[in-house]
Image: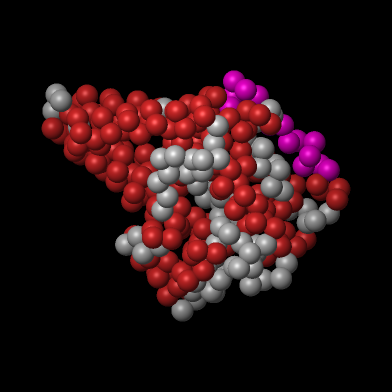
Amino acid sequence: MDAYLVEKIKKINTKKGTFEAFLVAFSNMVIPWIIAYAVCCAVTFSSFYYMLFPFISIYIGTRFRAINNMSHECIHFSFCKNKKLNEFFGEIFAIAEFSKFKLIRKEHLTHHKHLGDMDKDMDFNGIRKYGLHKKMTRRRVLRHVHQALFLRQIKDTFFFIIYDGDAPFWSNAVRLSYVLTLSFLLFSFPLWFLFLFIVPYCYFYQIQKHLTDVLDHGGLLNNDSSIHKSRNFIIKNRFLSALLMPRFDGYHLVHHLLPWLSVEKHHVAHKILLENSEYLTSEHLAINHIQRWLNDK
């Protein structure tokens, strides 16, 4: 990567302050449940509003993905300016998605260091059998979609941690409170809990998590150059991008080239990186990737 481009990007890499970081976390962790609560209140007046449950379920599933992405930002200390606050938010996000922050960080750093080496990349070591390294053709894409929709990968990717021995005491206390609250909701409102927590977390989030790995690296892991082992998957429609690629997840090549970069600056960095000829010749738009894959039998 050209040094002068990296310097230009460093100058625009302003990270979120504490207040802004809390707002971002609030919008992805609390607002979805406020919406869900509002819909539950609505169905007590009219069963018509049950029609909204599938849409809310999908939406909440995408917010679990957003939480996972924010946890990922904390791993790289790019979620906000303060290092300790990144650690704090990382633990909070891990609680929300039932993961282990320190373990996930340890594994994810091997993903950046050993991308393409399925023995050393602990992020991908458990899912190597699903063909991420194989060329993306129409048949391969349909197979990935089939695997995701029928949760074939879930035994290798699902986690539900209710105690983290590496986490501080306060984190496990909050985690226990979270589990007890969810247990209360499960037994008090089983149908609502099914549609607004179990289905979003156990189905829609798992689908999105697996397919995102496919979109980020599918068919590229055997390439030699780091610039060709990851791809951007930029969705031009802002609504769809925010829903399907939360936290600017469509700029995954940008992230691998500049893992320290705040995700809010990915789109700016992308424009700067286009000055590099090798980066410029890579395909970046989601629609063009899809068309090429489906045309390749």
Residue range (magenta)? 7-21
State how the image is colored.
secondary structure
Hey, which quadrant is residue 247 in on the image? top right
Q: Residue at x 61, y 33 (%)?
A: 87
Q: Please, which residue is most extreme toward the bottom here?
A: 297
Tell me the quadrant of the picture where the N terminus can be found: bottom right
Q: Is residue 171 magenta?
A: no
Q: Nearer the viewer, residue 286 or 203?
A: 203
Judge left or right: residue 153 versus residue 13.
Answer: left
Query: What is the number of callouts on the image?
Result: 0
| Magenta stretch: helix, strand or loop mostly | helix
Q: Is residue 11 magenta?
A: yes
Q: Residue at x 80, y 47 (%)?
A: 6
Q: Is residue 210 visible?
A: yes
Judge left or right: residue 166 versus residue 162.
Answer: right
* Image position, residue 90 (x, y; %): 56, 36
Query: Is 110 located above or below residue 178 in the figure?
Result: below
Judge left or right: residue 243 versus residue 81.
Answer: left
Q: Residue at x 79, y 39 (%)?
A: 10
Q: Please, which residue is most extreme toward the right here?
A: 4
* Image position, residue 141 (x, y; %): 44, 68
Q: Nearer the viewer, residue 157 or 25?
A: 157
Query: Is 288 located above or below residue 39 in the figure?
Result: below
Hey, which quadrant is residue 189 in on the image? top left
Q: Is residue 62 visible?
A: no
* Image position, residue 53 (x, y; %): 25, 39
* Image position, residue 269 (x, y; %): 71, 44
